[in-house]
Image (cartoon, grey):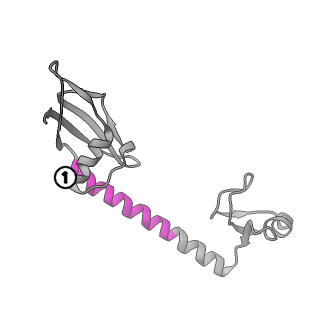
Amino acid sequence: MKVILLQDIKALGKRGELVEASDGYARNYLLPRKLAKEANAQAMNEYKNAENSKQYKIATEKAQAEAAKKKLEGKVFKMTARAGRSGKLFGSITSKQVAEEIKKQYNIAVDKRKVVLECDIKEFGTYKAEVKLYTGISANIDVQVSEGT
């Protein structure tokens, strides 16, 4: 019997999947406990609509990531920081600060965990960073740190 899972079931599959289960298992265990619903015409139609919706969402997210990559690729983000006499910064420039600068300049929201710095930024200079926008889509940027007040 074909059923659509309403919850994750360890031996069968994940929530929202269409799976084949034995008749007895489906009728006596899955359906009474509301762990799955029978794959009738209405349920199959809902399942196909949900799948199409998922695919559309993935496609739009990829398109947005590609557009953001075109905007960011190769750009230089100038940041200022205070430093001591030896040129060492008080603290460091973090990925959070880089993400905020991207948001400020290009209005592209980037999670701070998606900004990968080449190394810790504790001195003045230019550093490479990678911004992961989507699975397999990332932009390489430069972060230029200069002295400021």
Q: Is residue 108 magenta?
A: no
Instruction: Note whether 47 is above or below 141 in the view shown.
Output: below
Write down the region rendered in magenta.
52-72
Q: Position of residue 139 (x, y in %)?
A: 28, 44
Q: Position of residue 122 (x, y in %)?
A: 25, 26
**Residue type for callout 1:** Gln
Residue that label 1 marks: 105
How many residues crowd mark 1 within 10 Å: few (<14), some (14–19), many (20+)?
A: few
Residue drawn where x is 65% and y is 57% of the image: 14
Q: Position of residue 55 (x, y in %)?
A: 46, 65
Q: Position of residue 60 (x, y in %)?
A: 37, 64
Res 23 quadrant in image: bottom right
Residue drawn where x is 86% and y is 67% of the image: 28
Q: How many marks?
A: 1
Could you say whether the residue bearing mark 1 is in a helix, strand or loop? helix
Q: Quadrant of the N terminus?
A: bottom right
Observer-nearest of 101 and 74: 101
